[in-house]
Protein backbone atom coordinates (compact mmCIF):
# COMPACT_ATOMS: atom_id res chain seq x y z
CA UNK A 1 0.00 0.00 0.00
CA UNK A 2 1.29 3.45 -0.91
CA UNK A 3 2.62 5.58 1.89
CA UNK A 4 2.85 8.77 -0.12
CA UNK A 5 1.02 11.75 1.38
CA UNK A 6 -2.46 12.18 -0.08
CA UNK A 7 -3.66 15.52 -1.37
CA UNK A 8 -6.40 17.28 0.58
CA UNK A 9 -8.77 16.46 -2.30
CA UNK A 10 -7.89 12.75 -2.17
CA UNK A 11 -8.38 12.69 1.60
CA UNK A 12 -11.79 14.35 1.30
CA UNK A 13 -12.84 11.90 -1.44
CA UNK A 14 -11.85 8.90 0.67
CA UNK A 15 -13.60 10.32 3.74
CA UNK A 16 -16.90 10.30 1.80
CA UNK A 17 -16.95 6.57 2.50
CA UNK A 18 -16.16 7.03 6.20
CA UNK A 19 -19.07 8.96 7.74
CA UNK A 20 -18.14 10.50 11.07
CA UNK A 21 -14.49 10.90 10.11
CA UNK A 22 -13.12 14.33 9.31
CA UNK A 23 -9.85 16.15 8.89
CA UNK A 24 -8.23 18.05 11.74
CA UNK A 25 -5.21 19.78 10.29
CA UNK A 26 -2.95 17.06 8.91
CA UNK A 27 -4.82 14.25 10.66
CA UNK A 28 -8.05 12.35 10.24
CA UNK A 29 -10.15 11.93 13.34
CA UNK A 30 -13.34 10.48 14.74
CA UNK A 31 -14.86 10.41 18.21
CA UNK A 32 -17.07 7.47 19.17
CA UNK A 33 -19.57 7.49 22.08
CA UNK A 34 -20.57 4.51 24.22
CA UNK A 35 -23.15 3.56 26.82
CA UNK A 36 -20.59 3.64 29.62
CA UNK A 37 -16.93 3.59 30.55
CA UNK A 38 -16.24 -0.14 30.25
CA UNK A 39 -17.67 -0.23 26.72
CA UNK A 40 -15.32 2.60 25.78
CA UNK A 41 -12.37 0.78 27.39
CA UNK A 42 -13.21 -2.40 25.45
CA UNK A 43 -13.17 -0.40 22.23
CA UNK A 44 -9.75 1.03 23.09
CA UNK A 45 -8.37 -2.49 23.56
CA UNK A 46 -9.87 -3.63 20.26
CA UNK A 47 -8.47 -0.60 18.41
CA UNK A 48 -5.07 -1.18 20.01
CA UNK A 49 -5.08 -4.76 18.70
CA UNK A 50 -5.93 -3.58 15.19
CA UNK A 51 -3.20 -0.97 15.39
CA UNK A 52 -0.62 -3.56 16.41
CA UNK A 53 -1.74 -5.82 13.56
CA UNK A 54 -1.38 -2.97 11.05
CA UNK A 55 1.72 -1.57 12.76
CA UNK A 56 0.01 1.80 12.46
CA UNK A 57 -1.04 3.75 15.53
CA UNK A 58 -3.38 6.63 16.20
CA UNK A 59 -3.41 9.04 19.09
CA UNK A 60 -6.11 7.26 21.04
CA UNK A 61 -7.92 9.23 23.73
CA UNK A 62 -10.20 7.59 26.27
CA UNK A 63 -12.87 9.65 27.99
CA UNK A 64 -15.59 8.53 30.38
CA UNK A 65 -17.74 7.17 27.55
CA UNK A 66 -15.85 8.37 24.48
CA UNK A 67 -12.93 7.20 22.39
CA UNK A 68 -11.21 9.57 20.01
CA UNK A 69 -8.79 8.52 17.32
CA UNK A 70 -6.58 11.00 15.47
CA UNK A 71 -4.06 9.65 13.02
CA UNK A 72 -1.57 10.56 10.37
CA UNK A 73 1.52 8.82 9.07
CA UNK A 74 4.72 9.82 10.84
CA UNK A 75 6.91 8.27 8.12
CA UNK A 76 5.15 10.44 5.49
CA UNK A 77 6.04 13.65 7.26
CA UNK A 78 2.93 13.62 9.44
CA UNK A 79 0.57 13.71 6.46
CA UNK A 80 -2.50 11.57 5.78
CA UNK A 81 -1.85 8.44 3.71
CA UNK A 82 -3.79 5.35 2.70
CA UNK A 83 -2.48 3.67 5.87
CA UNK A 84 -4.56 6.09 7.94
CA UNK A 85 -7.65 5.40 5.85
CA UNK A 86 -7.09 1.66 6.21
CA UNK A 87 -6.94 2.00 10.00
CA UNK A 88 -10.14 4.05 9.94
CA UNK A 89 -11.91 1.38 7.82
CA UNK A 90 -10.78 -1.40 10.13
CA UNK A 91 -12.01 0.50 13.19
CA UNK A 92 -15.33 1.31 11.52
CA UNK A 93 -15.82 -2.40 10.87
CA UNK A 94 -15.70 -3.29 14.57
CA UNK A 95 -17.34 -0.18 16.06
CA UNK A 96 -20.98 -1.37 15.76
CA UNK A 97 -20.24 -4.52 17.76
CA UNK A 98 -19.14 -2.24 20.63
CA UNK A 99 -22.35 -0.23 20.48
CA UNK A 100 -20.42 2.80 19.27
CA UNK A 101 -22.37 5.84 18.23
C1 LIG B 1 8.95 1.29 13.57
C2 LIG B 1 7.48 1.26 13.26
O1 LIG B 1 7.24 0.43 12.16
C3 LIG B 1 6.96 2.63 12.94
O2 LIG B 1 7.32 3.52 13.96
C4 LIG B 1 5.47 2.66 12.66
C5 LIG B 1 4.62 2.40 13.90
N1 LIG B 1 3.36 3.08 13.88
C6 LIG B 1 3.13 4.15 13.10
N2 LIG B 1 2.02 4.82 13.23
C7 LIG B 1 1.77 5.91 12.50
N3 LIG B 1 0.62 6.57 12.68
N4 LIG B 1 2.67 6.36 11.60
C8 LIG B 1 3.84 5.73 11.39
O3 LIG B 1 4.64 6.15 10.53
C9 LIG B 1 4.10 4.57 12.16
N5 LIG B 1 5.21 3.90 12.02
Image (cartoon, rainbow, N blue to C red):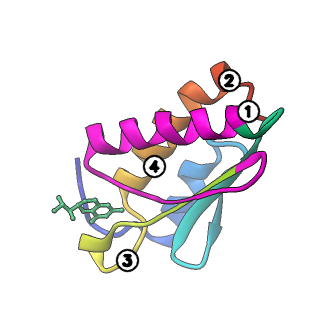
Q: Are marks 2 and 1 in contact (CB under 8 Å)?
A: yes
Q: Which residue is mark 2?
A: 96
- Whether the residues at callouts 1 and 4 have beta carbons within 8 Å, the answer is no
For the residue labelled by badge 2, is the local secondary structure a helix, a strand or a loop?
helix
Residue occupying the point 74% across, 25% down:
99
User: Looking at the image, is mark 4 or mark 2 nearer the viewer?
Assistant: 2
First of labels 1, 3 by sequence position: 3
Boundaries of the magenta span: 38-66
Residue labelled with disc 3: 78
Q: Which residue is mark 4?
A: 85
Q: Nearer the viewer, residue 43 or 2?
A: 43
N-terminal of the pair, mark 3 or mark 2, is 3
Residue 18 part of the magenta segment: no
* Pointer 3 local density, CA inside 10 Å: few below 14, some 14–19, many at least 20: few
In the picture provided, is 56 more to the left or to the right than 90? left
Looking at the rendering, which quadrant does residue 74 occupy?
bottom left
**Position above or below: 90 against 3:** above
User: Image quadrant for the C terminus?
Assistant: top right
* Label 4 packing within 10 angstroms: few (<14), some (14-19), many (20+): many
Q: Earlier in the sequence, mark 4 or mark 3?
A: 3
Location of mark 1 (residue): 100
Amino acid sequence: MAVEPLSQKDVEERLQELPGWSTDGDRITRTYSFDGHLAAVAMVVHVARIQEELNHHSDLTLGYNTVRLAVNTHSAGGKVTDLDLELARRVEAVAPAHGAG
